[in-house]
Image (cartoon, rainbow, N blue to C red):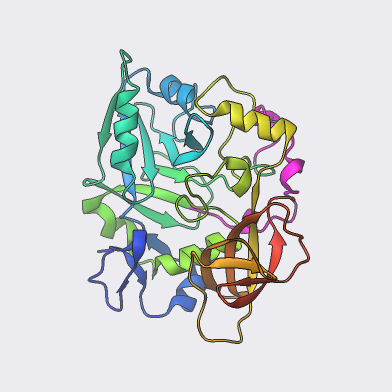
Amino acid sequence: MTDLTRPGAVDGSGVDAGVPAHYGDPMREQRLLAEGLACVDLSHRGVVTITGPDRLTWLHSMTTQDLAGLPPRTSRQSLVLTPKGHVEHDLHIVDDGETTWITVEPGTAPTLIGWLRSMQFMLRVTVEDVSDRYAVLGEPIRAESVPAEPLAWVDPWPGEGLVPAPARGREPYAAYGPIEEHPGGDRAWRELIVARGELAATVGDRPLAGTWAAEALRIHAWEPRLGFETDHRTIAHEVDWLRSAVHLHKGCYRGQETIARVHNLGRPPRRLVLLHLDGSGHALPEAGSPVVAGDREVGRLTSVARHWEDGPIGLAVIKRNTPIDVDLVAGGVAAAQTVVVSA
């Protein structure tokens, strides 16, 4: 089983409680995951299904991604925005030809389902929370699933460069940084959707890595996570989600005006950065700690980890006008920034 009864398993905390943070050797687990050998228990993620002939056009009309006519076993990432364009939900979407499967952050499925049902009107769709029957298993593979294996959502991050822009109907993404040297290009990741009774068989004899390992590789790839790099004010541009989760040339949807206005006319008020943290101390600063430049607070540390090669690293969301060469301090620890979203 992929649960806390495994030898050495240590429970996670916060939203990742209920699945192992590690199994006794976090650095070894991280190396195995980076080498493509391990898998990660993500069975705390929510799983939502939508059936009915209108399911894809309905989702297409309400979210940020082009989902109309989505082929079976083809993955997309899409966002639900507020009317003012703030990010509410991050949807990991894959359709099997009859049902649209969505995995979401732990604890967010009920809120998402409530909103979806409120928008159903007379459309032929049925929304269901199947989290009690299906679980998510993360694995370091960048390939869509085939009929002989469980359905999988493949992470598109970092988006541009992995699929040519014309194939998505999108313009080049140079405004938010080049793709050629993006560290996310080396990170393969997908989420298998598995019946809970089949988890152990799906894992087989592969080693398991905890969420600490998965989070360290996510942070190293500069990939934002809902509820970590986002708050109630976040717009997609600030955390670089225009790369993977927003289609810039589709029809109207809730929050589109903000997406278009900031993309075409301005800059986001905040920006995501990678922080290289001083590793001379034993303790890491806590996520949520203030980030300070001189005597001025400029943002907050959103995620932190020890990377198996780069040491202590973190992601932070800071004010856009913070100079890129200024010395920063995050939670009392000196930090150097790498630009993720261009200032």
Magenta stretch holds residue 184: yes
**Position in image of residue 276 (x %, y %):** 65, 71
Q: Quadrant of residue 161?
A: top right
Residue furthest top in the image: 122
Q: Nearer the viewer, residue 154 or 67?
A: 67
- Can you tell which quarter of the image residue 101 is in? top left
Looking at the picture, how far across and down is residue 342, in whole percent? 74, 50
Q: Is residue 38 left or right of residue 301?
A: left
Say which of 49 and 225 sits in front. Answer: 225
Name the image quarter holding the N terminus.
bottom left
Name which quarter of the figure residue 237 lies in.
top right
Residue 70, placed above or below residue 152: above
Give the mark count.
0
Q: What residue appears at the point 55 percent right and 66 percent down from the top-left corner? A: 290
Q: Nearer the viewer, residue 316 or 145?
A: 316
327 drawn magenta: no
Q: Residue at x 26, y 45 (%)?
A: 131
Residues rendered magenta in the picture: 163-189
Position of residue 207 relative to residue 121, above or below, is: below
Which residue is found at the position 74% from the left and 48% from the top? Answer: 177
For the point 27% across and 77% down, the residue is 7
Return the x and y of residue 140 as percentages of the image width and height: 50, 58
Whether residue 158 is visible: no
Q: Position of residue 25 (x, y in %)?
A: 42, 80
